Image (cartoon, rainbow, N blue to C red):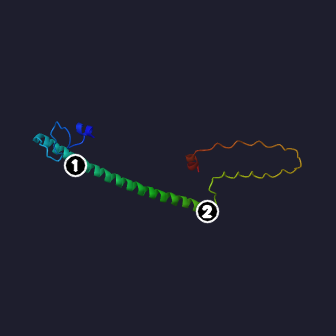
Amino acid sequence: MTALIAVGLIHGEGFHTTPQTSPLAPSVQTPEASKSTGRLLERVRELKTEVQEWRRRAEVAEARAEERRRAFDALQIANETECMALRMLTGQSSHITQAPATPQPVRPIPTAEPETSPEPVAPVAPPEPRRGFFSRIFSA
């Protein structure tokens, strides 16, 4: 204990080389230092006001985000409900199935026809070349 008092760690007792000043005692400032302090205090007030404004904006943004999340959840539930109702009405299952294969057309079974000798076929004349639109209109 005596060592702490001697070093000056316990105030009010022991050896002191410098006079003790009360921390509550007003310090003497020069006019230039007081102007600088005034400007700094004003800047601190401005920054505090700015911080409050940004906090308010952050709270508003969080509230809007929460509102949008709830609206999105409601829309998602409504969409799922509509899909379920549509499946019930149309009788479709919830999973996608492949389209059923189209049945092959039924071909008539050929019956045995009596064989006849092939008759000579008369030559067919080639079809007349097709005429244009205007020539058909004006030639009539």
Earlier residue among tags 1 and 2: 1
At 52% across and 59% down in the image, what residue appears?
Answer: 77
Image spot of residue 44 (x, y percent):
22, 46
Number of numbered discs: 2
Left or right of residue 120: residue 53: left
Type of amino acid at the residue the image marks with label 2:
Met
Quadrant location of the N terminus in the rendered image: top left
The residue beneath circle 1 is 45
Tag 1, which secondary structure?
A: helix
Of 43 and 134, the residue lying toward us: 43
Q: What residue is disc 2 on?
A: 88
Type of the residue with mark 1: Arg
In the rendered view, would you say 112 is above or below 33? below
Percent of width and height locating residue 35: 13, 43
Q: Position of residue 92 (x, y in %)?
A: 63, 58
Q: Position of residue 18 (x, y in %)?
A: 16, 37
Residue at image point 24% right, 42% down = 10
- Gap in Å between the C-alphas at discs 1 and 2? 65 Å
Nearer the observer, 118 or 70: 70
Q: In the image, is residue 50 above or below residue 14? A: below
Query: Which of labels 1 and 2 is toward the front?
Result: 1
Q: Is residue 132 left or right of residue 13?
A: right
Q: Residue at x 60, y 60 (%)?
A: 87
